[in-house]
Image (cartoon, helix red, strand yellow):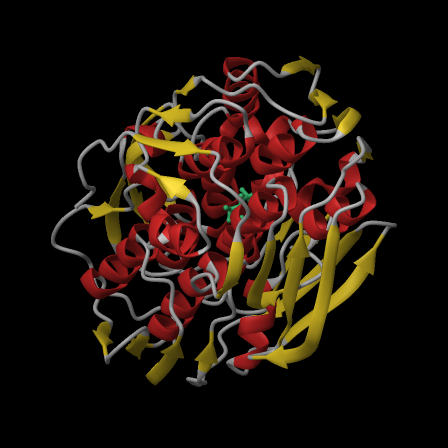
Amino acid sequence: MHTDIAPLTARRHGPLKGRLRVPGDKSISHRALILGALAVGETRILGLLEGEDVLNTGKAVRALGARVERHGAREWRVHGVGVGGFAEPAAPLDFGNSGTGCRLMLGAVAGCPIAATFDGDASLRRRPMRRVLEPLERIGAHTLSSSEGRLPLRLAGARDPIPIVFEPPVPSAQLKSAVLLAGLAAPGETIVIEAEATRDHTEKMLVHFGAGVRVEPHGTLGRRITLAGQPELTPQPIVVPADPSSAAFPLVAAVITPGSDVILDGVMLNPLRAGLVATLIEMGALIERVGMRNEGGEEVADLRVRAGALRGVEVPASRAPAMIDEYPVLAVAAAFAEGTTVMRGLKELRVKESDRLAATVALLRANGVTADIAGDDLIVEGRGRAVGGGLVVTHMDHRIAMAALVMGLASEKPVKTDDASFIATSFPGFVELMRSLGADLR
Ligand code: S3P
């Protein structure tokens, strides 16, 4: 289903102006389809992200027996089969580029007495799955075949799922969510103890669907999440807010392109997702939050962003979970700041859609910016400007492609990407929306 390679070039071309709404949140969209499929009856989803990653999750739950239908623009309905009710799929489940879709569905299948084959594209086949298989095996699932914890793999779900206490070895909402989704089918309490809190969309949506979930603080940064097993999930309407990880690209583009003034409507500001906005404000960016409100259980606001001078800052490792997907574009902002920006504790970036630590440094260096990796830290020497002129290799990574194009909108020379087609995994319409602000993307 993935479209052909599409090189794209961004050029500086005056200020960005206008108002837009980025598509629905990817994390919430995956979860809406999955919990809808595990509920009994019809779940209505408004504003679903129609990106390739989410559409692949929709196909997977359909192959497992749920009915998934589109009703007009971005309204979707899912008829679920109930917790533990998935049917064995006839063919391998293909998650394309999506680690989230694959890992969450490994959890959902692990609680059902069926076997399924999980696969993905070349990028997803390189990403670690052992970290999620380990707790799922403790719950009672079996890995029937996999090459060194990579896709393609075949998983047999548990016949009698066992509730476990799990402490994720790395801060990961995907791991936490996989265990909670498998734990739905187990009797008794499944407990996840996070040393550092990660995005809490799974917990919140489980509560919304009527499951018993208790969330308590754990240490200074962590949380202890207790799920009461075998709930009957009751379908609830879901309104998907605008994705802050997609808003990040027009946001940074407006901050670094002189004279810009842009409004981004209804951006989700869940505190566990809002690290980029906080960091940019520390750097001196002119970002106003207007009309704070609650939409579908999440805080949202319109963000008015104007271009202005930035200064380098130190971003603590403790902030990484709240902005894990935003480092490539933050690194671009850092190049346009005056002074050094140090982003600490980015080990997890090495196992994203690409090795994002390496890809981000390569992106910056190709465009005349001094950048280095020290241990797990990324250091960018900001000079208030960037030369540009580079060709950025995107490694099947949508966020590297968008970050490179944002840089090209403000650098002295154009920035080229070898392949922008993967942008469609998370941000369909990116090029058109950026052009509507005045961006020159060709
Ligand atoms: C996601 C969690 C994050 C993030 C990904 C989406 C999710 O991954 O990078 O884009 O929806 O749970 P990890 O949980 O592995 O850090």
Of residue 144 and residue 46, the one placed in the foreground of this image is 46
* 220 relative to 99 in the view: left or right: right
Locate residue 291, reporting x and y percent: 69, 77
Residue in the foreground of this view, choosing between 336 and 392 = 336
Q: Which corner quadrant of the image does residue 258 belong to?
A: top right
Residue 239, placed above or below residue 96: below
Which residue shows up at 28% across the image and 42% down it? 96
Q: Nearer the viewer, residue 253 or 317?
A: 253
Asked if residue 121 is positioned above or below residue 298 in the image, the reply reads above
Residue 394 visible (yes or no): no
Residue 383 visible in the snapshot: yes
Find residue 440 and report its horizontal and vertical position in percent: 39, 41
The picture places residue 280, in percent across and down from the top left corner, at 73, 45
Viewed as shown, does residue 14 lie left or right of 269?
left
Occupied quadrant, residue 318: top right
Q: Quadrant of residue 32?
A: bottom left
1 relative to 329 in the view: left or right: left
Picture coordinates of residue 25, whole percent (x, y):
48, 61
